[in-house]
């Protein structure tokens, strides 16, 4: 191991960037998570491993390197998070939509694309999607899966509306104007409690530097 630095530490463990020779690896380690969240951290680690395994070989997402009970390693995708890159490149948004469709065809919903840090503008200008901790891999495209995929699309379109509203098609505007019933229920019941607990009690802002666009979203 030539170099190592911590990228993030929260209630579910820590994420480290490690270099082994010329290869950069991102390691999610849940052993330092508090005992009362470790069971959930382990479940989330398994979800990420399942999703990355299903997406093996897909350009634009990390590749799973290894995984055991308390640790997961994936390849590192170099690039800038969307909230830092602030791209206005029409080609990036079109390619990001294609990448998301490939995820869904592989049976994976990301479930966390509201966070701009999970979308990358890679060094070559192409899109990347990272952090599959909340992702869902399903062998069959059930009704619930299609709802989750629809919400993935809506969250990507929210970012497109923020940076390049002029590129939105009429169909995309209709999608933005029509959240799923599950999303409406979540925003009206679960989300206020979630924000109160994470931000007020735990002091944990999970947008990780992307800013708070709640009023616009």
Image: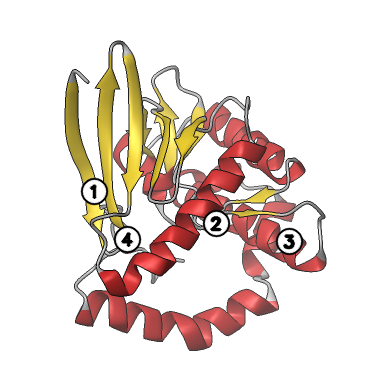
Q: Residue 75: horizontal and vertical position, in percent?
A: 43, 28
Query: In front here: 112 or 23?
Result: 23
Q: State the residue position of label 3.
A: 145
Marks 1 and 2, how far apart at CA? 23 Å
Q: Residues within 10 Å of mark 2 (few under 14, many from 20)?
A: many
Q: Residue at x 46, y 53 (%)?
A: 45
Q: Residue at x 53, y 30 (%)?
A: 92
Which sits earlier in the primary sequence, circle 1 or circle 2? 1
Question: Which mark's residue is nearer the viewer, 4 or 3?
Answer: 4
Marks 4 and 1, how far apart at CA? 10 Å
Which sits earlier in the primary sequence, circle 4 or circle 2? 4
The reply to whether residue 194 is in sight is yes
Secondary structure found at label 4:
loop
Label drawn at residue 8: 1
The answer to whether the residue labelled 4 contacts the one labelled 2, judged by CB atoms less than 8 Å apart, is no
Secondary structure found at label 1:
strand
Which sits earlier in the primary sequence, circle 3 or circle 1? 1
Marks 4 and 3, how far apart at CA? 25 Å
The answer to whether the residue labelled 1 contacts the one labelled 2, judged by CB atoms less than 8 Å apart, is no
The answer to whether the residue labelled 4 contacts the one labelled 1, judged by CB atoms less than 8 Å apart, is no
Which sits earlier in the primary sequence, circle 2 or circle 3? 3
The reply to whether residue 161 is in sight is no
In the visual, does 41 lie left or right of 129?
left
Label drawn at residue 12: 4
Question: Which mark's residue is nearer the viewer, 4 or 1?
Answer: 4
Q: Residue at x 62, y 34 (%)?
A: 94
Q: Residue at x 17, y 34 (%)?
A: 5
Q: State the residue position of label 2.
A: 155
């Amino acid at each position: 191991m030539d170099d190592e630095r911590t990228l993030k530490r929260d209630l579910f463990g820590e994420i480290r960037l490690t270099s082994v020779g010329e290869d950069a690896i991102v390691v999610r380690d849940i052993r330092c998570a508090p005992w009362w969240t470790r069971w959930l951290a382990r479940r989330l680690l398994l979800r990420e491993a399942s999703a990355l395994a299903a997406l093996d070989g897909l350009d634009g997402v990390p590749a799973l390197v290894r995984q055991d009970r308390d640790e997961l390693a994936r390849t590192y995708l170099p690039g800038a998070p969307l909230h830092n890159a602030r791209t206005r490149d029409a080609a990036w948004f079109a390619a990001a939509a294609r990448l998301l469709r490939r995820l869904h065809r592989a049976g994976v919903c990301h479930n966390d694309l509201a966070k701009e840090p999970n979308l990358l503008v890679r060094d070559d200008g192409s899109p990347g999607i990272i952090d599959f901790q909340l992702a869902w891999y399903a062998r069959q495209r059930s009704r619930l899966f299609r709802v989750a995929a629809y919400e993935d699309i809506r969250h990507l379109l929210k970012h497109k509306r923020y940076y390049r509203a002029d590129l939105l098609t009429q169909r995309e505007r209709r999608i933005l104007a029509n959240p799923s019933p599950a999303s409406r229920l979540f925003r009206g019941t679960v989300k206020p409690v979630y924000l109160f607990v994470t931000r007020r009690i735990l002091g944990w802002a999970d947008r990780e530097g992307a800013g708070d666009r709640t009023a616009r979203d």
